[in-house]
Image (cartoon, helix red, strand yellow):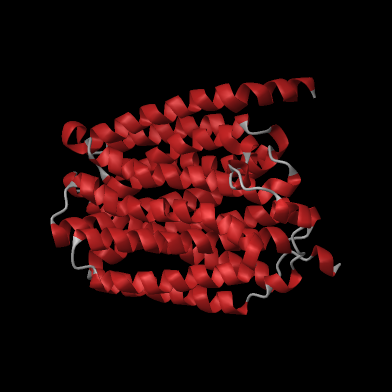
């Protein structure tokens, strides 16, 4: 019976570490742009670069962290990542100019990329094979909740506290992650990598799962749209005089994801991806349109509900599909591939979109992003949806 145990110490601690890493990531994602604008008079495009440089650092780190896990083990990589997260997080206090702030963000993102790659690998290894799908579902909820609660806490803290206190709060969470990482003993249970795997020559397929590329490309476009929501919601709410309502935007998003996720997860298992992904992307596009037209707090929070139903369920479902289409022994690589595309979209999206703000305004940006999501829906149908429909019809 012990071999079937799901809630082991290593599983719980790895999930908690990931939760803390993601909270800090998204907390700063929505507040660092206004910080750069306030401290250094950065324009929207530069603020977008400051915001996105973190994700770019995480993206770069993911390509390195995967092979490192195989060479030196999960725990050492996790300790290195969380320690880097603590040190780089503490240097925000010394960001005296914009270039230095961008560099700090980049290195901070690398810490998150290394740490979260290690936690994902640890979880995949410690879960019993017959409960791996269930366990990964619970583990991925740590990312979903972190992505939802982080922005809510960021907006709330930025509204009532100076930025120095916000940076201190993030550093404390990072330190908690490092302390938890010290107690994890997953490497003692790891099986050594096979000689054949160690001798295999490096190629792009050593860090990217080929079968997960189609859903990854769809995720890229959807992630650009969510990156726009994250990076510009505070600017937009100030422009529309909806700052109070915006404080609750991501709390509403989080509650919506929590309530809908168990239902949509079971639906995905029973009926396949189409019945979840197609409505989710339509709801996400509708949420962006409602956001662009928001004149009251109720409309803004209504957009949060639709975006929670849309992006919140797309993210978890797309991750599940990425794993489903991969060979079992490449499940971890498929998950990494999914997050590479997700990070790329959220990271580069704000910088590109920020340069369009003077032309379109924030409302125009959200309308444009609704079109991007609808394009992603058509792309999903073309690269995966039609194929799944045919397979289920003949099954």
Q: Nearer the viewer, residue 206 or 29?
A: 206
Residue 294, image x and y in percent?
27, 38
Viewer-proximal residue, 262 or 315? Answer: 315
On screen, residue 70 above or below 336: below
Q: Position of residue 29 (x, y in %)?
A: 34, 55
Across and down, in percent, residue 184 comes to 63, 75
- Image-quadrant location for residue 369: top left
| Quadrant of image for the N terminus | bottom right
Left or right: residue 332 versus residue 221 is right
The residue most toward the right is: 1
Determine if residue 245 is in view. no
For the point 64% across and 35% down, the residue is 211
Residue located 50% across and 46% down the image: 340
| Residue 222, horizontal then vertical, whole percent | 45, 37
Observer able to see residue 292: yes
Left or right of residue 251: residue 125: right
The residue that appears at 16% across and 36% down in the rendered structure is 358
Q: In front: 313, or 107?
A: 107
Q: Is residue 76 above or below residue 275?
A: below
The quarter of the picture where residue 223 lies is top left
Whether 75 is drawn above or below 199: the answer is below
Residue farthest along the left direction in this orientation: 41
Location of the C terminus by quadrant is: top right
Which residue is painted at 39% across and 74% down in the image? Answer: 87
Tally of marks = 0
* Residue 246 to residue 226: above or below: below
């Amino acid at each position: 019976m012990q071999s079937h145990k799901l809630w082991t110490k290593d599983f719980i601690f790895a999930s908690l570490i990931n939760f803390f890493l993601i909270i800090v990531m998204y907390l700063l994602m929505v507040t660092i742009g206004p910080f750069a604008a306030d401290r250094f008079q950065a324009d929207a495009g530069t603020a977008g670069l400051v915001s996105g440089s973190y994700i770019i650092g995480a993206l770069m780190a993911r390509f390195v962290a995967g092979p490192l896990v195989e060479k030196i083990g999960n725990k050492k990589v996790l300790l290195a990542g969380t320690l880097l997260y603590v040190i780089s997080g503490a240097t925000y206090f010394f960001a005296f100019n914009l270039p230095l702030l961008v560099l700090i963000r980049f290195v901070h993102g690398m810490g998150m990329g290394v740490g979260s790659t290690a936690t994902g690998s640890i979880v995949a290894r410690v879960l019993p094979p017959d409960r791996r799908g269930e366990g990964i579902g619970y583990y991925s909820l740590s990312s979903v909740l972190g992505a939802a609660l982080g922005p809510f806490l960021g907006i709330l803290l930025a509204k009532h506290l100076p930025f120095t206190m916000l940076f201190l709060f993030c550093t404390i969470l990072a330190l908690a992650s490092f302390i938890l990482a010290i107690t994890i003993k997953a490497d003692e249970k790891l099986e050594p990598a096979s000689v054949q795997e160690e001798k295999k020559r490096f190629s792009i397929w050593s860090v990217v799962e080929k079968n997960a590329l189609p859903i990854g490309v769809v995720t890229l476009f959807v992630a650009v749209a969510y990156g726009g929501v994250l990076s510009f919601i505070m600017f937009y709410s100030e422009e529309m005089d909806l700052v109070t309502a915006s404080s609750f935007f991501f709390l509403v998003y989080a509650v919506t994801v929590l309530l809908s996720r168990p239902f949509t997860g079971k639906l995905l298992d029973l009926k396949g991806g189409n019945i979840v992904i197609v409505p989710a992307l339509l709801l996400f596009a509708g949420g962006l349109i409602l956001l662009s037209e928001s004149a009251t707090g109720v409309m803004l929070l209504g957009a949060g509900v639709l975006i929670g139903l849309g992006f919140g369920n797309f993210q978890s479902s797309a991750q599940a599909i990425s794993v489903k289409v991969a060979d079992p022994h490449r499940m971890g690589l498929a998950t990494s591939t999914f997050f590479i595309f997700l990070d790329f979209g959220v990271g580069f999206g704000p910088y590109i979109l920020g340069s369009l703000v003077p032309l379109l305004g924030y409302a125009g940006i959200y309308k444009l992003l609704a079109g991007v999501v609808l394009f992603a829906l058509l792309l999903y149908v073309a690269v995966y949806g039609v194929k799944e429909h045919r397979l289920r019809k003949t099954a």
